[in-house]
């Protein structure tokens, strides 16, 4: 038994060493900078806590991430449900449509949305020509543009867990509910939706956590009018060369994400996050 353990450790050693050297050590070095301010080890955290700008950016980041997660799961539900009903060619075609965005750069998709959402872009011209609005809407360089771009990028991350949960629902349970006299709404509310809930919560949590650290899409579609925490950290490094502030803000974000993951794990075990059993 001891020999098997040693062999397992030796097999894992290259991967562990690579992770330590390329991920853990640089991350630890970055976070250590948060405690190197001349005013004291916790001075950078005090600056962030006392800054109205940082607090507003933090709140805005969480509100945008929450809105993106809610919109994404609402849009993902019908798509995931349709995927469970399709077969053969049409299923492959629909699944290809869901997965195809993964093969296109986020930067390319974001630039495409900049063209679509600008004041003289196709979307505004379409709305004006239909008479829905008298003048072009401000869809770019604000939270609206940021959420549109982020929902587009993150939608597959909500569809796939929800599809997995729906696919594993035993149809005999729905037939039993119908046979016992439950109506369509009652069957959905008391049987179908609870069984889909693990996939729904797993997808929503995944999208929410990814949204907290998004950088490219908010930076291009939001600009200076919709600053997120990742953009603020980049500003600390590129504009102010304040590495200690950037490290402190990064550490705070990581702690918040880990706390959210731990809280989610208490309510929704990650083993059930992708599939309903």
Image (cartoon, rainbow, N blue to C red):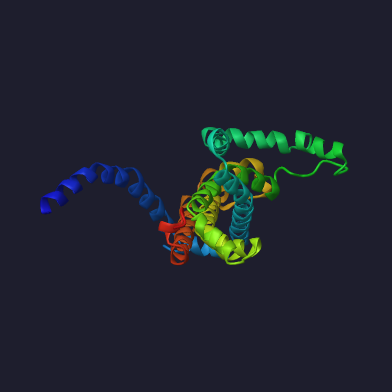
User: Residue at horizontal 51%, vertical 65%?
Assistant: 46
Answer yes or no: is residue 177 visible: yes
Residue found at the very far front of the displayed protein: 179
Q: How many marks?
A: 0
Quarter assignment of residue 126: top right
Answer yes or no: is residue 154 visible: no
User: Residue at horizontal 26%, vertical 44%?
Assistant: 17
Image coordinates of residue 12 in percent, x first then y, are: 24, 45
Quarter assignment of residue 86: top right
- In the picture, the quarter occupied by the C terminus is bottom left
Q: Is residue 24 left or right of residue 5?
A: right
Taking depth in this image into account, of 60 and 6 the one nearest to the observer is 6
Q: Is residue 154 left or right of residue 134?
A: left
Image coordinates of residue 185 in percent, x first then y, are: 65, 62
Image coordinates of residue 264 in percent, x first then y, are: 47, 63
User: Residue at horizontal 70%, vertical 44%?
Assistant: 141
User: Residue at horizontal 54%, vertical 64%?
Assistant: 49
- In the picture, the quarter occupied by the N terminus is bottom left
Taking depth in this image into account, of 34 and 172 the one nearest to the observer is 172
Taking depth in this image into account, of 174 and 19 the one nearest to the observer is 174
Image coordinates of residue 272 in percent, x first then y, are: 44, 58
């Amino acid at each position: 038994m001891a020999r098997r353990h040693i062999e397992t450790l030796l097999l894992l050693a290259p991967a562990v060493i690579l992770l330590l050297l390329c991920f853990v050590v640089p991350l630890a070095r970055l976070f250590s900078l948060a405690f190197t301010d001349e005013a004291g080890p916790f001075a950078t955290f005090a600056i962030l806590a006392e800054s109205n700008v940082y607090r507003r950016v933090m709140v805005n980041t969480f509100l945008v991430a929450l809105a993106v997660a809610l919109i994404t799961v609402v849009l993902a539900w019908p798509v995931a449900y349709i995927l469970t009903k399709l077969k053969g060619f049409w299923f492959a075609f629909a699944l290809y449509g869901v997965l195809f965005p993964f093969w296109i750069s986020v930067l390319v998709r974001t630039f495409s949305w900049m063209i679509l959402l600008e004041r003289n872009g196709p979307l505004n011209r379409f709305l004006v020509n239909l008479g829905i609005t008298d003048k072009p809407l401000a869809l770019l360089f604000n939270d609206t543009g940021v959420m549109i771009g982020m929902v587009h990028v993150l939608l597959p991350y909500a569809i796939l867990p929800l599809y997995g949960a729906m696919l594993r629902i035993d149809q005999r349970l729905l037939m039993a509910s119908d046979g016992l006299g439950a109506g369509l709404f009652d069957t959905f509310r008391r049987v179908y939706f609870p069984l889909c809930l693990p996939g729904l919560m797993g997808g929503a949590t995944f999208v929410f956590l990814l949204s907290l650290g998004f950088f490219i899409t908010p930076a291009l579609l939001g600009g200076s009018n919709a600053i997120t925490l990742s953009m603020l950290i980049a500003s600390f490094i590129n504009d102010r060369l304040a590495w200690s502030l950037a490290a402190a803000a990064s550490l705070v974000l990581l702690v918040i994400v880990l706390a959210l993951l731990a809280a989610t794990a208490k309510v929704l075990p990650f083993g059930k996050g992708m599939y309903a059993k």
